[in-house]
Amino acid sequence: MKIDGKTVGREAPVYFIAEIGSNFDQDLGRAKELIYLAREAGADAVKFQHYTADSLVSDYGFNQLGNRRSHQAMWKKSVFETYQDASLNRDWTEALKRTCDEAGVSFFTSPYSLELVDFVDPFVPAYKIGSGDITWPEIIEHIACKGKPVLLATGASSREDVQRAADTVLAVTPELVIMQCNTNYTAEIDNYPYLQLNVLRSFEAMYPGVVLGLSDHMPGHVSVLGAVALGARVIEKHFTDSTERDGPDHSFAMDPASWREMVDRTRELEASLGDGRKKIEENERETALVQRRCIRANRDLEQGTVMTKADLTMLRPCPAEGIPPYDMHKLIGKKLKRAVSFGEHLNWDDLQ
């Protein structure tokens, strides 16, 4: 698949999405600055979120939950008020898209209502469906029908949830990215056992050929590098200019330096993964010469000697014309055409 003309898939470089989310702190100027910082840090796309608090959460419902609110229990305001304060002014959408175009990154957003899907459609080259909407087939189908690539996050989901959502998309379009995700946003190292990166292998078995991805909230780069090694080609991480800022998403986001480090280490990993074909590489040909053994004379051998195993030894180095040890049985009983000195390697032209 292609996103804004850039190939995303198995044979393409890993595609990085910087999730700005609410980290622009309701300041359009900061949002624009973060776009440029993300581009400089190596992002291919930046992502915002389009929602209104009253179309996303029930104030009554969250008040009834008490402390059973996961990471949201740490927020200083109510969940409804936090979403209300953090929401993106939809009137800024065109300006943000224009800034992305000028910066050279793609503009993404996750729309959280059917109406907002339609509103953002002229501005986005692809859609990201957040994990929380994986059980809402209506919005999934509505997004898929837009005819653009769909990135599906699968946090806090069962295998059946993923199948239902993925099948809904694939019934409309083949352009799907399935992203493993864990939706515990505390960014604590105790969460590593719950990342379940090997689920990417399950996704590959369920949907051969579908692009794999990771939406991640962990510190450091272990989870990203592990996912890439397992086949992920799309990576999404939250992005901010400072993790010390006050706000719901800053603490588990990555700053420009850590983001750049992640991209650089990933590019090194991509190069090291190679094409899967086992061969002697160009940079190790001399190593093969000096480390491999070949068959050599174990004593001075006269012309006409009929060779026995005792006449031969296997020692380094092995020049191109040397005879490898696995051909030893072919030399036993052969007669030498010439005299061979102790330690000298034999080649096939020496034999009759």
Image: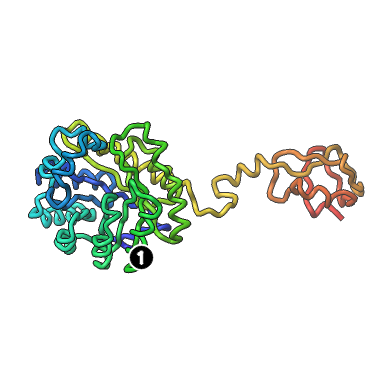
On the image, the x and y values in percent for residue 301 come to 88, 42
Q: Amino acid at mark 1?
A: Leu
Quarter of the figure that contains the N terminus: bottom left
- The residue sitting at 70% across, 44% down in the picture is 318
On the image, the x and y values in percent for residue 96 come to 14, 53
Q: Is residue 116 above or below residue 36?
A: below
Q: Quadrant of residue 93?
A: bottom left
In the picture as drawn, the residue positioned furthest to the left comes out as: 91
326 displayed left or right of 45: right
Q: Nearer the viewer, residue 324 or 235?
A: 235
Task: Check disc 1 and report its element: helix, strand or loop.
Answer: helix
Quarter of the figure that contains the C terminus: bottom right
- The residue sitting at 84% across, 44% down in the picture is 340
Total labels drawn: 1
On the image, the x and y values in percent for residue 135 come to 29, 55
- The residue sitting at 35% across, 68% down in the picture is 171
Q: Nearer the viewer, residue 93 or 289?
A: 93
Q: Nearer the viewer, residue 310 or 298?
A: 310
331 displayed left or right of 205: right
Q: Dot 1: within a 10 Å radius of its alpha carbon, few (fewer than 14), some, or many (20 or more) residues?
A: some
In the picture as drawn, the residue positioned furthest to the front comes out as: 64
Which residue is disc 1 drawn over? Answer: 170
| Model colouring | rainbow
- The residue sitting at 32% across, 55% down in the picture is 152
On the image, the x and y values in percent for residue 197 come to 42, 44
Q: Nearer the viewer, residue 346 or 88?
A: 88
